[in-house]
Amino acid sequence: MNWLLAAFAACALTASVHCATGTVEWCYHLPSCNETTWATIAPKFCNGSRQSPINIVSASATGDSSLTAFSFTNYNSNSTLKKISNTGETVKVTLASGVQVSGGGLSEAYDSLQFHLHWGNGSSVPGSEHTVDGRQYPMELHIVNSKSSVNGNTTLALADSTGLAALGFFIEETSSNTTASFAAWHKLTSYLANITEEGQQVDIDPGISMDDLLVGVDRTQYYRYLGSLTTPTCNEVVVWTVFKQSIKVNRELIDLFSKTVHVGNSTSPLMVNVFRSTQPELPVRTQASGSSKGCYSLGLMALSLILGKH
Ligand SMILES: *[C@@H]1O[C@H](CO)[C@@H](O)[C@H](O)[C@H]1NC(C)=O
Ligand SMILES: *[C@@H]1O[C@H](CO)[C@@H](O)[C@H](O)[C@H]1NC(C)=O
Ligand SMILES: *[C@@H]1O[C@H](CO)[C@@H](O)[C@H](O)[C@H]1NC(C)=O
Ligand SMILES: *[C@@H]1O[C@H](CO)[C@@H](O)[C@H](O)[C@H]1NC(C)=O
Ligand SMILES: *[C@@H]1O[C@H](CO)[C@@H](O)[C@H](O)[C@H]1NC(C)=O
Ligand SMILES: *[C@@H]1O[C@H](CO)[C@@H](O)[C@H](O)[C@H]1NC(C)=O
Ligand SMILES: *[C@@H]1O[C@H](CO)[C@@H](O)[C@H](O)[C@H]1NC(C)=O
Ligand SMILES: *[C@@H]1O[C@H](CO)[C@@H](O)[C@H](O)[C@H]1NC(C)=O
Ligand SMILES: [Zn+2]
């Protein structure tokens, strides 16, 4: 997950090296600043013990009945996607105020601020950040949310171990042009040609909603763990939700990301392999499954058998 709010934009927009806090220069594509250097250049958190992303071992996820359904506010509005920009390390879409997520075992409502994407090199070289049972997906979409009570104050959000909530959606390729999400992804990716260089941004026309982009995913099925930002300075303040089902996006549209946007100006490399590798495993929870109900009724049955005997 990228922490790329306007508050940190003061950091110099150099050609291909980026800093999240104004002090740390990092990147994905150069040996001098790629992820192998992050624990050294931003040791406070990047070398921490609650780092994201992780490989999720589905069989090890423990059931938790507090992981209820989410409520999404204004995810159905077609005028909430404001601007799309090339930050030099991702493609980011900023959202209008009033877009929120709550429920889902979160302690309070969180404001949805932006979403951005991680990818590899076309649909055949995967680039999701999280993996599930070792499987890496072609892309991953991250919706970045901050606690509504901090009211957009980034200092407060970064000082709170659950100050941010990130929603991660895997993206898988399909050859179909008739999926329910095709029109929305076609429209969204059409803007990539307008932001080929770092620092470029354009307004998004009304007509695409968050629901349009996320269509097909059962948002009651997810994994939950406490982790970090996946880019320096890797602050350990993120409540992660990783949805089990993936968004299906047309292969040609996925390929556009690694073929269109550059890390700097048009003579710089194309933006490819923009993801962090998985970090040491962390405890993961998921919905309490149907089988635990089964155990419960089995327990009752056993109990009534015992009682019956006496
Ligand atoms: C592109 O960026 C490079 C590195 O910063 C710079 O040397 C070069 O002059 C730039 N080219 C153009 C066309 O702006
Ligand atoms: C990062 O750079 C190191 C050299 O410092 C290199 O060995 C490694 O393959 C690079 N990793 C990535 C993900 O590019
Ligand atoms: C990272 O932390 C480990 C201990 O957890 C330490 O041995 C190592 O030197 C640290 N690395 C850096 C670059 O600070
Ligand atoms: C990405 O893939 C293209 C071909 O699809 C290839 O030419 C290019 O070298 C690849 N880039 C990297 C960094 O692997
Ligand atoms: C954020 O909150 C901190 C602590 O309460 C305060 O010092 C700071 O001025 C606030 N920042 C902004 C931009 O409001
Ligand atoms: C499907 O859509 C992609 C992206 O717009 C396009 O490149 C491709 O030609 C389309 N294929 C068909 C069969 O219409
Ligand atoms: C994006 O680029 C296309 C083609 O160059 C152009 O027609 C369109 O006006 C641009 N859109 C925006 C929002 O700048
Ligand atoms: C956006 O949604 C409103 C209300 O549902 C609808 O009237 C309008 O036609 C939509 N606009 C676009 C561009 O799809
Ligand atoms: Zn991200």
Image (cartoon, rainbow, N blue to C red):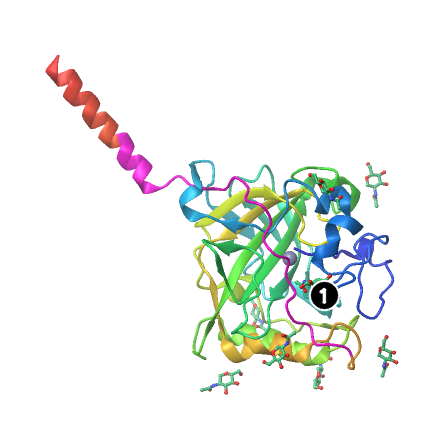
Looking at the rendering, in which quadrant would you find the N terminus?
A: bottom right
Magenta stretch: residue 248 in it? no
Residue 15: percent from the left, percent from the top?
Answer: 83, 71
The residue that appears at 67% across and 37% down in the rendered structure is: 161
Amino acid of disc 1: Glu
**Does the numbered disc 1 mark a residue whose Cβ is under 8 Å from ligand 9?**
no
What count of labels does the image hold? 1
Residues drawn in magenta: 268-296
Residue 54: percent from the left, percent from the top?
Answer: 56, 50
The residue that appears at 66% across and 73% down in the rendered structure is: 205
Asked whether, in this view, residue 292 is left or right of residue 199, the answer is: left
Q: Which residue is mark 1?
A: 89
Residue 289: percent from the left, percent from the top?
Answer: 36, 41
Asked whether, in this view, residue 248 is left or right of residue 8, the answer is: left
Front-most of residues 270 and 300: 270
Asked whether, in this view, residue 14 is left or right of residue 276, the answer is: right
Residue 242: percent from the left, percent from the top?
Answer: 52, 52
Q: Quadrant of residue 119?
A: bottom right
Q: Residue furthest top?
A: 310
In the figure, 277 relative to 91: above or below?
above
Q: Is residue 239 visible?
A: yes
Magenta stretch: residue 288 in it? yes
Q: Quadrant of residue 262?
A: bottom right
Front-most of residues 259 and 168: 259
Few, some or many residues within 10 Å of mark 1 (<14, 14–19, 20+):
many
The residue that appears at 23% across and 26% down in the rendered structure is: 300
Point out the quarter of the image occupied by ligand 8: bottom right
Most prominent secondary structure in the magenta stretch? loop
Q: Is residue 186 visible?
A: no
Q: Secondary structure at mark 1?
A: loop
In the figure, 15 relative to 155: above or below?
below
